[in-house]
């Protein structure tokens, strides 16, 4: 009898696989990458080092990190045809352009078709370097400029800001971007990572899995929170308006963007590392009011923290991007830059003990009935 079947909509609470990559304790507000707390990594590590840790399982030695970093820098190139594809799709949403360009790379670079573990690793390093290049090139092309060539002397985060703006970022701005990427690098079986695993489960190549992940991340219920927070901040306008805004939202039973999370009941452990960075960057850019509005919203939301409505990481990310003058439709693509190592290692894990992911749906349609020929139907 199907009445005895328990439905877990959205697979909520279902464990579908084991993973040695990230541990999330939503009640305690804890996040570990390979056993290392996100706090230690955000305060002391770099994105390149975290990439290595996630993919290889251990923190690198100096020589290992140098080699990995050199491989990332050496992969900063795009086939000329990709620039032509970007030009042809320049009016599209940046996530659509990014997804299309990554899909094109699968056809343009023969190595992308290989599906072994070593090929996944090589292609993963190359894509990690290429994704920010695609986003920056699209931003330049759609604004009538030539793409900025990568600077081999700059690290991953600093080079991203350089390619996007054509200006060398300050050390503080580059470090904040680096921390932002670290905080977004991996987060368990989120929607896009799960989608990538489903693709790898069919024995598809890594590029196909990343295209799947990008398409999933583009949905506003997954990757759109930072953009929504910035829209909220602009709507509030001044810190003095925050309390009334929150009160009106709660009275209407509408969510306040940037609060609450599918996993965390306590404050998202990643949020604190963006909070101070927003304050400092706001002061550097001469726009401290954005941070003040955010903190006024936090104060107004404090009575609801006991219900699990705590700040998440995206609450601060959008303002960081705003302070850099980055258009709002690039916020989700920036999320993708940071999440690349997480997608890669989830794909590698799936491949190690691969199985086709094929859940069931419980049929609740009509029971068996007789077929009526077309001429006999009313």
Image (cartoon, rainbow, N blue to C red):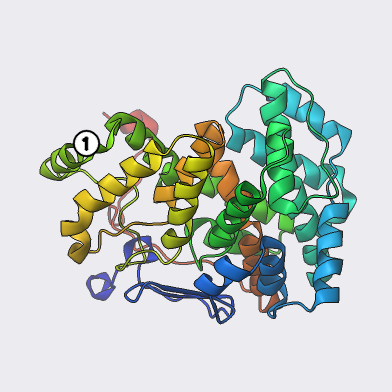
Front-most of 313 and 361? 313
Question: Circle 1 sits on which residue?
Answer: 240
* Label 1 SS: helix
Q: Badge 1, how many Cα within 10 Å: few under 14, some, many 20+?
A: few
Relative to 30, residue 207 above or below: above
Measuring 65% from the left and 57% from the top, which residue is drawn there? 340
| Position of 159 relative to 261 (above/below) | above
Asked if residue 212 shows in the view, the reply is no
Quadrant of the rendered structure where residue 247 is? top left
Horizontally, is 238 left or right of 106 in the view?
Answer: left
Q: Residue at x 72, y 17 (%)?
A: 144
Image quarter where the N terminus lies is: bottom left
- Report x, y in % for residue 122: 83, 62
Give the quadrant of residue 170. top right
**Foreground pick, 301 / 115:** 301
Q: Nearer the viewer, residue 159 or 22?
A: 159
Q: Residue furthest top?
A: 144
Q: Is residue 173 visible?
A: yes
């Amino acid at each position: 009898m199907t009445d005895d079947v328990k439905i877990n909509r959205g697979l909520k609470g279902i464990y579908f696989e084991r993973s040695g990559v990230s541990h999330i304790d939503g009640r305690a507000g804890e996040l570990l990458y390979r056993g290392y707390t996100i706090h230690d990594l955000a305060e002391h590590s770099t994105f390149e080092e975290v990439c290595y840790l996630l993919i290889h399982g251990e923190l690198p030695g100096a020589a290992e990190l140098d080699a990995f970093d050199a491989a990332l820098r050496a992969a900063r190139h795009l086939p000329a045809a990709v620039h032509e594809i970007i030009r042809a799709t320049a009016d599209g949403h940046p996530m659509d352009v990014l997804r299309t360009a990554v899909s094109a790379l699968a056809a343009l670079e023969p190595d992308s078709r290989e599906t072994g573990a070593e090929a996944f690793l090589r292609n993963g390093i190359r894509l990690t370097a290429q994704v920010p290049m695609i986003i920056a090139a699209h931003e330049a092309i759609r604004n009538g400029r030539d793409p900025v060539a990568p600077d081999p002397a700059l690290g991953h985060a600093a080079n991203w800001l350089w390619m996007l703006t054509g200006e060398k970022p300050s050390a503080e701005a580059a470090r904040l971007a680096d921390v932002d990427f670290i905080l977004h690098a991996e987060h368990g079986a989120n929607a896009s990572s799960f989608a990538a695993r489903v693709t790898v489960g069919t024995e598809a190549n890594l590029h196909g899995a990343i295209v799947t992940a990008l398409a999933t991340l583009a949905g506003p219920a997954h990757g759109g929170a930072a953009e929504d927070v910035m829209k909220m901040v602009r709507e509030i306008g001044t810190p003095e308006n925050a309390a009334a805004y929150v009160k009106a939202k709660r009275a209407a039973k509408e969510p306040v963007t940037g609060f609450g999370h599918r996993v965390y009941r306590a404050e998202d452990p990643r949020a604190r590392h963006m909070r101070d960075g927003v304050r400092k960057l706001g002061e550097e850019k001469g726009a401290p009011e954005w941070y003040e509005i955010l903190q006024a919203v936090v104060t107004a939301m404090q009575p609801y923290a006991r219900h699990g409505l705590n700040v998440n990481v995206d609450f601060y990310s959008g303002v960081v991007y705003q302070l850099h003058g980055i258009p709002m439709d690039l916020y989700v693509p920036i999320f993708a830059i940071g999440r690349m190592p997480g997608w890669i290692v989830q794909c590698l894990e799936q491949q190690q003990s691969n199985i086709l992911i094929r859940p069931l749906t419980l049929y609740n349609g009509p029971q068996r009935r007789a077929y009526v020929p077309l001429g006999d139907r009313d």
